Image (spheres, grey):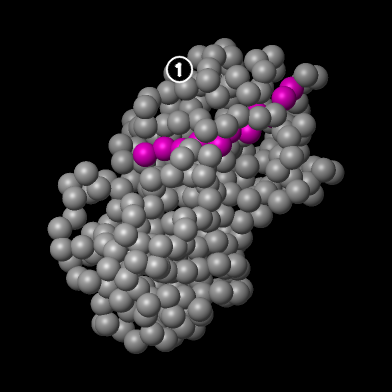
Amino acid sequence: MSEVDPTSEATGTPLPFEALQAAPGTRNIRLTIAYDGTDYSGWQVQPARPSVQACVEQAILKITGEQRRLYCAGRTDAGVHALGQEANFYTLSRIPAPSFRRALQTELPDDIVVVRSQEVHLGFHATFSAVCKRYRYVIHDGEVCPPFLRRYCAHSRFRLDAERMQQATACLLGTHDFRCFEKEYPNKLTSVRTIMDARVYRSSCWPMWQSAHTWGQPTTESGAADGPFVIFEVMADGFLYNMVRAIVGTLTDIGRGRQPIDYLRTVIQSLDRAAAGMTAVPEGLYLVNVDYGDTDAAT
């Protein structure tokens, strides 16, 4: 993360050093990005390894001639996908904001798509301005998992009780210390987070078959008792490293009947990562959307 100091009067959030020293005419461009994370080491630039950030930054360089840092809402891990990742960068380019979408797409691989581009005020920061984020995790627990889905969902060899899993999610709601679901603790700041929504439901439909303009929205619960997909959706003001996948691993143990419904509460109270379930595989995880509240408005 770049150096930050004062805060924006518009948003009350820290401004990156790049914006503080912005030359006259500097613009702030916000991108909504969807990507298949299978072939990437994650969002963040990694030495000698492909990353989503590096691909988009290279595309920005090609169309503007500027070497710019891209700030994102959430740094997804290797193999994790996004339907509505948000990012921003500063530029002196006069390319019309909506045209960045088409221009960038000509320089990007097919598994990274710019869904929208817009100009926002200099105080907008994809990381610090975020109010909440929503993630979705998809599990296929049918007898045979179609090979075409192997990169886009987790597969359970055991039938899961989605109703038990849904009942267990009640204890996630509210503000808690979630260090029990964090891969590395202690972290530099705090492991306290607030979860506003958490739910598990079964569906007969592949939950990614939506038109592009609805990618960043929650799916509609189908209520299909015999559907092969179990979907976990969670919205919070922030997430710890591997937090969603650790929650899913614990919920899966409950869904298999290996743990009681109230086990999730016991794990949270323990503050112990060893008490939780295994970290679920990355293929089933999607960053669905990011909410910025009043700072959503473009310039």
Position of the N terminus, as image quadrant, is: top right
Part of the protein shown in magenta: 26-36
**Residue at position x 60%, y 19% in the image:** 99
**Residue at position x 57%, y 40% in the image:** 86
Residue found farthest to the right: 9
Question: Amino acid under label 1?
Answer: Thr
Judged from the image, the secondary structure of the residue bearing numbered disc 1 is loop
Say which of 264 and 102 sits in front. 102
The answer to whether 10 is drawn above or below residue 108 in the figure is below
Q: Is residue 250 visible?
A: no
152 in the magenta segment = no
Position of the C terminus, as image quadrant, is: top right
34 in the magenta segment = yes
Say which of 197 and 43 sits in front. 197
**Residue at position x 47%, y 79% in the image:** 268
Residue designated by label 1: 106
Percent of width and height locating residue 55: 43, 27
